[in-house]
Image (cartoon, rainbow, N blue to C red):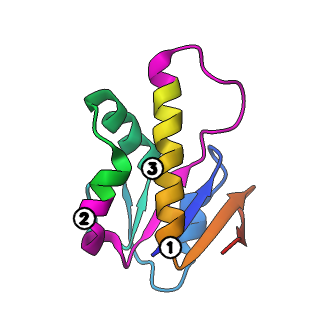
């Protein structure tokens, strides 16, 4: 699995499309039929609202995504939100990123459309 992360509107999905073997990119989950899945932070927001731990959901379905490119927005930067739901989402998104980075063969941070391999 390859994990790509970065801030909003930094070109993460476009970067993924240039990777070898990536022919299709799906928007968010649970569509693992595409080579890459973009927008996992939307999934973590839905999990936050439903009281489901996103990392546990991924652990239970590892065989479905282990050969995919997963793309997630890093929402951990900036001012801490005042709303409890937004803080919980930020924390859950971070936990999922930690889990996926630990499982990934390659990890890229994309900034201004430029990907830097960090693992």
**3 or 1: tag closer to the N-terminus:** 3
Determine the CA span between mark 3 and mark 2: 18 Å
Q: Position of residue 28 (x, y in %)?
A: 36, 51
* Residue 29 visible from this viewpoint: no
At x 48% / y 17%, what residue is drawn? 84
Task: Quarter of the image for the C terminus: give it.
Answer: bottom right
Give percent across and percent down for residue 2.
51, 73
Q: Secondary structure at mark 1?
A: loop
**Relative to 12, residue 48 above or below:** above
In this picture, which residue range is highlighted in magenta? 59-86
- Residue 58 seen: yes
Instruction: Choose the circle earlier in sequence order: 3 or 2.
Output: 3
Image-based side of 37 in relation to 75, left or right? left
The residue positioned farthest toward the bottom in the image shown: 20
Q: Depth-wise, is mark 3 or mark 2 nearer the camera?
A: 2
> In this view of the protein, which residue sits in the foreground, 66 or 20?
66
Element type at marker 3?
loop
Secondary structure under the numbered disc 2 in the rendered image: loop
* Distance from Cα at disc 3 to Cα at disc 1: 17 Å
Q: Which mark is residue 104?
A: 1
Report which quarter residue 48 is drawn in: top left
Task: Report the residue marked by disc 2.
Answer: 61
Q: Earlier in the sequence, mark 1 or mark 2?
A: 2
Q: CA distance from mark 1 to mark 2?
A: 15 Å
Q: Which residue is mark 3?
A: 39
Dividing the picture into quarters, in which one does residue 31 lie? bottom left
Q: Residues within 10 Å of mark 3 (few under 14, many from 20)?
A: some
| Horizontal and vertical percent position of residue 7 | 65, 46
């Amino acid at each position: 699995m390859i994990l790509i992360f970065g801030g909003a509107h930094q070109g993460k999905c476009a970067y993924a499309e240039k990777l070898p073997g990536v022919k299709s990119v799906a928007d968010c989950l649970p569509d693992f039929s595409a080579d890459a899945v973009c927008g996992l932070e939307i999934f973590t927001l839905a999990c936050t609202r439903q009281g489901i731990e996103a990392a546990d959901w991924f652990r239970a379905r590892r065989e479905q995504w282990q050969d995919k490119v997963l793309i997630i927005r890093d929402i951990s930067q900036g001012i801490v939100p005042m709303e409890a739901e937004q803080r919980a989402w930020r924390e859950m998104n971070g936990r999922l990123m930690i889990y996926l980075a630990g499982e990934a063969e390659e990890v890229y941070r994309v900034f201004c459309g430029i990907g830097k391999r960090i693992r």
